[in-house]
Amino acid sequence: MNLPAALRRLTGAVRPGGPVVVTLDPTGALVVGGKKLFPIGLSLGPPQDGKAPNGRNALAEVAGAGVSFVRGGRDDWSRGALQEQLATEGALLDALASHGLHDWLWLGGLPNLPASGSSPNETLLTSIVNELKEHPALLAWKGVDEPAHAHVAPAGLVHARQRLHALDPSHPLVITQAPVGTEAELLPYRAAFDITGADVYPVSYPPGTHAGTSNHDISVVGDVTKKMVAAAGGKPVWMTLQIAWSGVTPTKERPEIVPRFPSLHDERFMAYQAIANGARGLVFFGGHLTEIASPADAKAGWNWTFWNETLRPVVAELSSASVAPALVAPAAAPSMRASAADVEHVARDDGRFLYVVAVRRDAAQTSEVELTGLPDKRDGTPIRGGQVLFEYAQEPPPPPIEPGHQQFRPVAVSGGAFRDWFGPHDAHVYRFAL
């Protein structure tokens, strides 16, 4: 990976009186305080002083399920209101820190600077960064939103990244693109970010229009992820997935819009499909769009119904002790094959286990699929079996993996191959002891 020297440092240490140094390891995983992290974020998160329906503090509730950051910042930074705006952001940072969360801090349109000479944007950007960069809850900066789609020239963004790193070498800059556009159109932005990604929201009436492609199925998430990975050139990709968005939110101008949300099956598939295609972080957007939430949720300021029914189970699974190691592990040798062309997969090896994340793109197909190419164990003996994480079968009893590990549905392996059923948009996560 072609990372700046400041981001290749793997100290992850908290400097006395300074920030938590956030770096990127060679796989693209974040290293925060010396610990690898697959970042899971909310954009926007619940009110910092709000309450979940169970009476728990809102931030404590999402942190407890496995959320690691929320998007803060704003798009209307101004010199006249700067002190009030900084105080607001400082209060959010303090609240996040008190619950073990971090802030993905949006700098609005400020990180777009001329190549020479000072500018109002640079003066304001410098004030904001110098004021907030030392806070231990700061995770990363969010740059100009969807710049390619908005026809923002890359040169000003590249210069802004250089200036930002000069001011603050301890936190990466993330640029999120729209799902539209080609890889060639995105390539000029590669020097403008440390981490990139795209937002893609395919669940709507009619479906799949947000990405602007011929694929209107939710599997478009994998297509866009793959494009962003190619455009990133080895830099990490965070994908922003749907809770809700403007395309499912009626307005006075467009009252014909009908609200629609992903199901639990949809959300889980989209998350794992993004991961199978190379995502190293996920953001979930739209919980704050309470105009299409229940009256109780609207009053609470966040869509807690969607959280409890759909998003919380997905976040809890991704951040679990069983799955989380797979999400920060290096990719394994790409020798595995699936007998069905519509099954996408990625293998990860953390030294103790080989993990395989596999998803079925097809919205209608159900069949048994064979995956081949599993390696031998470290001692040269063949792998005989593994587990399907977060799937259960009490009979026959699953084989033990090691003491203290939860037991899941077993899968038999022979000759480096195993078979399993895949239905429409199924996602399976396999774990094999090495």
Image (cartoon, rainbow, N blue to C red):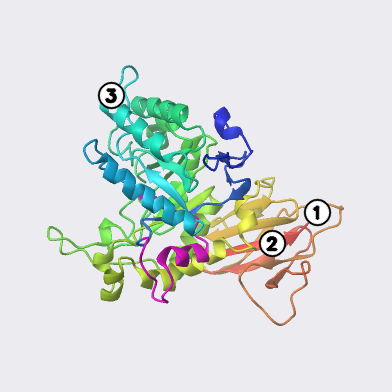
Quadrant containing the C terminus is: bottom right
Q: Which residue is mark 3?
A: 119
Of labels 1 and 2, earlier in sequence is 1
Point out the tag, 3 or 2, that comes first from the N-terminus. 3
Mark 1 lies on residue: 376
- How far separated are the C-alphas under marks 3 and 2? 53 Å
Q: Quadrant of the N terminus?
A: top right
Residue picked out by circle 2: 431
Q: Residue 60: x, y in percent?
A: 47, 65
Residue 399 versus residue 275 in the image, above or below: below
**Residue 264 % position (x, y):** 45, 70
Three-letter amino acid code of the residue under disc 2: Arg
The magenta segment: 48-73
Within 10 Å of disc 1 (Cα), the crowding (few <14, some 14-19, many 20+) is some
What is the secondary structure assignment of the residue under circle 3?
loop
Foreground: disc 1 or disc 2: 2
